Image (tube, rainbow, N blue to C red):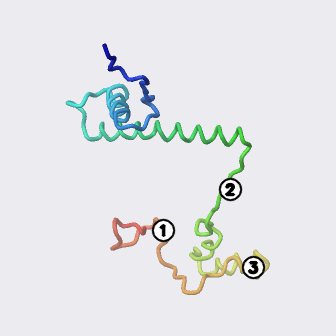
Amino acid sequence: MVSTVPDIIQIEDDRTGTSVETLKRAFLDNLFYIQGKFPKIATRHDYYLALAYTVRDRLINRWLNTSQTYLERASRTVAYLSADFLLGPHLGQQPDQPGDLRQRQAGHGGSGAALRRPAGAGGGAGVGQRRPGSAGGLLH
C-alpha cells in the first residue's frame, strides 16, 4: 500500500504567519477572541478591528525581531529630521503685536538673523488654524 501522507507538514504560527490560510485563521481568531463576535453578527467596525489586530501582530513580530538584531549586533540607527519640522524659522512669522518681532530681535543681539520673515511670507493663518472657506475649516 502506498502512503499519501506528505513527508513534511509545515504549520505557520497564527500570530506571525503570512500565508493566505494563516491570515484567514488569524483574522477569524481575532474576530472571535478579541472582538467577541462571529461573522454573522460582526459589524464592519468589528471586521476592521480584527484586520487591524491581524496586521499589528505581524508588525510587532517584525519590529521586535529587528530590535533584537540591533541589540545583538550593537547596530546604530541614523535618523534624518527635515528642517520643515523645526520651529525656529516660524517663530517670527506671526508676531502677536507689531512690536514683538523687533523686541525679539533686540533680545538676540539685535541681529534678528534667526527671526527675520522669509521673503514673501504672509501673516495668514498657520497650519491647523481655522480659515473661512477652507476645506473643513482647516488648512492642510
Q: Earlier in the sequence, mark 2 or mark 3?
A: 2
Please tell me the numbered disc located at residue 127. Answer: 1
Please tell me the numbered disc located at residue 111. Answer: none
Vertical order, 78 against 10 (above or below): below
Q: Nearer the viewer, mark 3 or mark 1?
A: 1
- Quadrant of the image for the C terminus? bottom left
Please tell me the numbered disc located at residue 106. Answer: 3
Crowding at mark 2 (Cα within 10 Å: few <14, some 14-19, many 20+): few
The amino acid marked with disc number 2 is Val
In-front residue for pair 85/53: 53
Residue pushed farthest bottom? 119
Q: CA distance from mark 3 to mark 1?
A: 27 Å
The amino acid marked with disc number 1 is Val
Q: CA distance from mark 2 to mark 3?
A: 37 Å
Residue at horizontal 65 percent and vertical 40 percent from the top: 69
Residue 109 image position (x, y, % from top left): 79, 78
Residue pushed farthest front? 1
Q: Nearer the viewer, mark 1 or mark 2?
A: 2
* Residue behind mark 2: 78
Vertical order, 99 against 42 (above or below): below
Residue 97 sits in quarter:
bottom right
Residue 92 image position (x, y, % from top left): 62, 76
Q: How many marks?
A: 3
